[in-house]
Amino acid sequence: MTGMEGVPGIGAGAGARASRRGVLGGVLGGIGVALVAGGPASAAAAGDGRTAGAGEIGAAGHGGKPAPRPVAPVNQESAVKFGPEYKTLPSAVVGVDIEPLIGMNSAGDIKARREFLAGYIWKGAALPKTLPTVEQGVEAPEGLKDLTGVRRIDLLTVQLKYQVTAKVYDLLPRKPWNHRLALYHNGHGEPPESMIRAAQALLDRGYRVMAYAMPFHHWNAQGIEDPSSPGTMLPPPSHRELVPWESAEFSTLTFFLEPLTVTLNYAQQAYQPKSVEMIGLSGGGWTTTVYSALDPRVTRSYPVAGSLPFFLRPASPKPSPTIGDFEQTKASFPGFYAASSDDFLDMYVMASIGENRGQLQILNRFDECCFNGVSHRVYQAPVRDRVRLMAGGRPERGRWDLLEDATHDDHTISPHALSVILWDLDRSQPNI
């Protein structure tokens, strides 16, 4: 979980509480910002004759009219637990001009930054062109066993440095494939509820789904070769213990990002999806933010509870975990987070510009872990407007927005947030 590696008290309890609460709904990003969706969501046709329930709100409404973006009220049971710092802007935003903190102003800016980031990660090279090894028809790992509607599971194995491998599970739907690929990236050991809920909804819509885990977590728990003693294996490290492996010749960021590049190479070669969507929670939300900025093959991205701009992190109501894990801090990677602007604001723009590209950032106002509160309201409109400007006002060439989810107080992708993600995906159908 982002910012919470090794911190007790986060885990199975979150899923249990979410289960007890049931489907609570949510709040549109930025209370006080115009509700562009217009009006509350009601049950709408899901496009196949069914009545849309929680997690099934699609783009088509009654009479062929587009369904509005799902909205729901603040969960008052959660709201009474938290103080005013979860409802008001922090003092850190006073007098801050957001515009100069966004360094992306042109396609040339984005191209140059992508080349810079790739050069840092792969030490002067571009994104790798390698392919994974593929084993077809494997058993579901723990965390994915409860999924239904799966025709076949393939295991994609990516060989990394220091005898580290990354396992990625490629889930083929039993329904006819809709020619879209969805990537789901879990975080630092989050329980599987959000992953299962999201993957199931996508499989039920005919998506092919690739499931990813963070390095040295879940099905990627493994040892690593000692950098000073080749052939000697060491126990699985925490991310903050990766410092000895970082060098001028190698970046440990490859452990986080290269599996996505290599498995996307395979998807393009093997079955050529018409679009690639990416969803990530917590540490997976950070991965989604960074990777969708880096690789324009990702068309729509949905990072959940994964990042805040650097200047806002200490101002979060629960600042300690929000400062970020090893891979998320300037102290760990001063050569990677090196922009004179804010790296994360730039990444939001980079992930959103391009034909049929866009990003919806999701932050939980009452998140029990990280990136909580309402400080994001200060940058929502500037980032959204910068993307609109760069896209020439044409949403098919780029769009960005933020969903503030106040329907719960867990570290999760809530049923409401998932309904908004599915609504957004349904209205961005590729040309098949």
Image (tube, grey):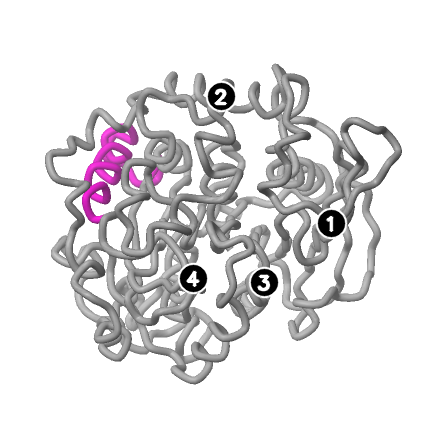
Residue type for callout 4: Leu
**Stretch of the chain drawn in magenta:** 377-398
- Give SS at disc 4: helix
Cα distance between the residues tagged 4 and 1:
26 Å
The residue singled out by tag 1 in the image is 167
| Between discs 1 and 2, the one toward the N terminus | 1
Marks 2 and 3 in Cβ contact (< 8 Å):
no
The residue singled out by tag 2 in the image is 335
Decide which of 274, 235 is in the foreground and name it. Answer: 235
The residue singled out by tag 3 in the image is 206
Cα distance between the residues tagged 2 and 4:
36 Å
- Give SS at disc 2: loop
Left or right of residue 263, residue 29 in this image: left
The residue under the point 54% across, 53% down is 5
Q: Which of marks 2 and 4 is in front?
A: 2
| Between discs 4 and 3, the one toward the N terminus | 3
